[in-house]
Image (cartoon, rainbow, N blue to C red):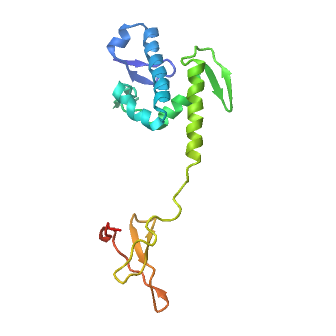
C-alpha cells in the first residue's frame, strides 16, 4: 500500500500492510528501535564501513519508495555515507541543528544521552585515526622496479584524457630520453 507522508504531498513511500494494521505510534516505535539498533551496532563494530556490510544480515535496509512519476525504488543496503549522516544527526538525540548550533527540540529523543555520547566519541576517535594516516604513499610503488630489455629503468606515466597507463624508459641514448611505451598487459608480474 502507498501512503503519502504528511511533511510534503509528493513524498510517497511504501508501507507494508502489517505496519498499517498497527497503530501509527507502534510503527514509529519500530523505526525508533531500528535507529537505536544502528547506534548500538556501530559501538560494537567500531566502523561505519563494517556496519554498512553488517546491517543487511540483520534485515536493516533502506525503505522502498515510489517517486512522483510512479517509479518504484526497492530496498537497498544503507550506504556508509548515509550511516554517517544518521550517526551524526542530533535529531535522534531530541535536538534541532541550525548552522553550527543545536537547540532542544519539541520531539522526544530516540537515542539516550549515554549512547549518543559514546557513538560521537567513537566517531571522533575514528576520524582522528584516519587523519593521522598518510594521504599517499611516499613515491610510486613501482619506481625503479621495472626495466626494459636493455636494463634501463622505466617509470609509470598516465593521462587524464584517455584512461591508459604508459611505461616510459628513462635510459638515455644520444642525450635524449628514449621513450619506449609498453602496454600495461606486457608488464611481467615478477619482481
Q: Could you tell me which residue is drawn at 57 percent across and 26 percent down? A: 118
* Image height of 83 relative to 1, above or below: below
Q: Could you tell me which residue is drawn at 60 percent across and 25 percent down? A: 117
Task: Point out residue 144 in the picture as x, y percentages from the top left corner.
Answer: 45, 73
* Image height of 150 relative to 40, above or below: below
Q: Could you tell me which residue is drawn at 37 percent across and 11 percent down? A: 20
Residue 32 horizontal side relative to residue 74, left or right: right
Q: Quadrant of the N terminus?
A: top left
Residue 57 horizontal side relative to residue 24, left or right: left
Task: Point out residue 124 in the picture as x, y percentages from the top left corner.
Answer: 60, 36
Task: Point out residue 62 in the picture as x, y percentages from the top left corner.
Answer: 40, 28
Query: In the current view of this chain or complex, which residue is farthest to the bottom?
Result: 174
Quadrant housing residue 70: top left
* Image height of 67 relative to 49, above or below: above
Q: Quadrant of the C terminus?
A: bottom left
Please state which of residues 46 and 120 is positioned toward the viewer in this rendering: 46
Q: Could you tell me which residue is drawn at 63 percent across and 23 percent down? A: 96
Quadrant housing residue 128: top right
Quadrant housing residue 166: bottom left
Query: In the current view of this chain or complex, which residue is farthest to the front?
Result: 191
Please state which of residues 50 and 82 is positioned toward the viewer in this rendering: 50
Count of numbered circles in the view = 0
Amino acid at each position: 500500500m502507498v501512503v503519502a507522508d504528511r511533511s510534503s504531498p509528493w513524498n510517497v513511500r511504501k508501507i507494508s500492510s502489517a505496519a498499517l494494521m498497527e497503530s501509527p505510534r507502534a510503527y514509529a516505535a519500530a523505526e525508533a528501535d531500528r535507529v537505536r539498533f544502528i547506534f548500538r551496532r556501530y559501538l560494537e563494530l567500531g566502523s561505519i564501513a563494517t556496519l554498512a556490510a553488517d546491517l543487511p544480515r540483520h534485515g536493516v535496509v533502506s525503505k522502498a519508495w515510489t517517486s512522483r512519476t510512479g517509479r518504484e525504488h526497492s530496498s537497498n543496503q544503507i550506504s556508509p555515507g548515509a550511516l554517517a549522516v544518521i550517526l551524526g544527526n542530533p535529531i535522534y538525540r531530541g535536538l534541532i541543528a541550525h548552522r553550527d548550533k543545536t537547540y532542544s527540540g519539541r520531539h522526544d529523543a530516540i537515542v539516550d544521552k549515554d549512547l549518543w555520547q559514546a557513538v560521537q566519541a567513537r566517531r571522533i576517535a575514528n576520524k582522528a585515526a584516519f587523519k593521522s594516516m598518510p594521504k599517499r604513499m611516499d613515491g610510486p610503488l613501482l619506481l625503479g622496479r621495472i626495466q626494459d630489455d636493455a636494463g634501463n629503468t622505466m617509470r609509470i606515466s598516465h593521462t587524464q584524457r584517455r584512461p591508459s597507463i604508459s611505461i616510459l624508459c628513462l635510459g638515455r641514448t644520444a642525450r635524449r630520453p628514449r621513450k619506449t611505451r609498453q602496454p600495461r598487459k606486457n608488464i611481467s608480474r615478477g619482481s
